[in-house]
Image (cartoon, helix red, strand yellow):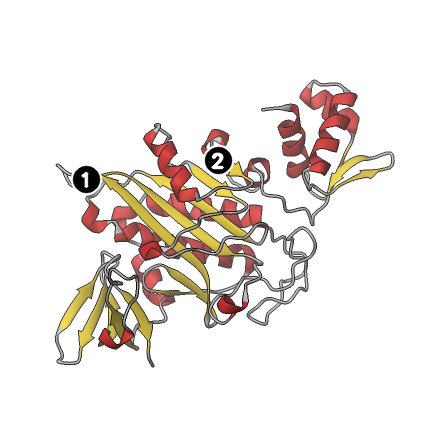
Amino acid sequence: MSTRENVLKALENNKGAAVSGEELASRLNISRAAVWKAIQELRKGGYRIEAVTNRGYCLSPDSDVLSREGILSCLNGDFPPERIHVFKSLESTNLTAKKMALDGAAPGTVVIAGEQTGGRGRMGRSFYSPPDGGIYMSFILKPQFDAAKSVLITTAASVAVCKAIENVTGISCRIKWVNDIYLGDKKICGILTEAVTDFESGHIDYIVCGIGINYSTSFPEELSGIAGALFESPSPGGHLSAGEKLSAGREISPGKDVSRNRLIAEIISQILAISENLDAKTFIEDYRSRSFVLGKEILIIPRAGNDGERNLADGIPAEAVDIDEDGGLVVRYRDGSLGTLNSGEISIRTVK
């Protein structure tokens, strides 16, 4: 790692506490001048680093610049640093992750961006991804099953993200089948899973699972009625201090440390833990308990036509009755017959 990265790692590991320049220089085997230069570079990059008289340098608890070092400082265990890639801006984290997978990136590699200029959701729809207010990340995974069961990745990722949000912030979210996460009546997260398969065997070469979370995002008027964010009024730098109001009307418990880096680290832990035991399908019951469509009347909306429009009048009414063991949505049609819906072929709209 560079001197700048090593200094940042030391500060992140002692976030909120002062570390002397002399100690940093000794620990990293560099000069005091090199430490000072690295501190200046970090400040220019947006890090809030205070110089404490006779004590050294302190990375403010309110600092929340996305960085590999900040994420690693929140991860438990020996996670390979080279598998975390953080960018200020990308066209799409999924696109970059797919290119990395083709170049031989290891399973478990994570691509993170502070902004997406061409973020995408399911069925080719755009995903609003402005700078600083969101979490945009993609995983490269290597499941051991055929493409017919790829919906399991999206199902598992939905549970992993909900658990991560709850563990870090105390906020409980719910899932709209198959890949949308809601807080109250607004969508705060979308998940896009893309697979590359071997056409002869039907097996998946790799899967890229993209996750976009509205952390403290502000929306244009046309989206404000349907899209929400985890937090409404973040402190400068994007950090949520104790006592700030959440969009669900609750408050963070006193002293709780919440940041984008910490939430990303928890998502990494949850995703990898679930994906390593995907065949056990232990997350399915959790998915069912977090679903807000089960037991409700829905409309099954057909794919868009060549003109890109979907006619809601052509929607098929049904009742959502269960989630099967492969993540499919079991529905009961008006004539009493049952059917199972799979990812990628429909959208749903709750009607009551």
Amino acid found under the numbered disc labelled 1: His
- Badge 2 amino acid: Ile
Q: Residue at x 44, y 39 (%)?
A: 110
Instruction: Please identify the quarter of the rendering in which residue 45 is found.
Output: top right
Image vertical order of residue 44 relative to residue 154, above or below? above
Q: Is residue 28 left or right of residue 328?
A: right
Q: Which residue is mark 2?
A: 84
Q: Quadrant of the N terminus?
A: top right
For image coordinates 27% across by 53% down, the residue present is 151
Q: Would you say 30 lies left or right of 121 here?
A: right
The part of the image, by quadrant, that contains residue 176 is: bottom left
**Vertical position of residue 68 compared to residue 152: above or below:** above
Q: Which residue is mark 1?
A: 203
Instruction: Report x, y in % for residue 301.
Output: 26, 69
The image shows a total of numbered marks equal to 2
- 283 sits to left or right of 138: left
Residue 234 found in image quarter: bottom right
**Residue 25's spot in the image, x, y percent?**
74, 22
Q: Nearer the viewer, residue 35 or 349?
A: 349
Label 2: how many Cα within 10 Å (few below 14, some 14–19, many 20+): some
Calculate the distance from the C-alpha at mark 2 to the C-alpha at mark 1.
26 Å
Say which quadrant the C terminus sits in: bottom left
Residue 229 at x, y = what percent? Answer: 53, 62
Q: Secondary structure at mark 1?
A: loop
Q: Position of residue 101 (x, y in %)?
A: 35, 33
At label 1, counting other C-alpha atoms closer than 10 Å, the crowd grade (few under 14, some 14-19, many 20 or more) is some
Give the residue displayed 59% in from the left and 70% down from the top.
Answer: 250
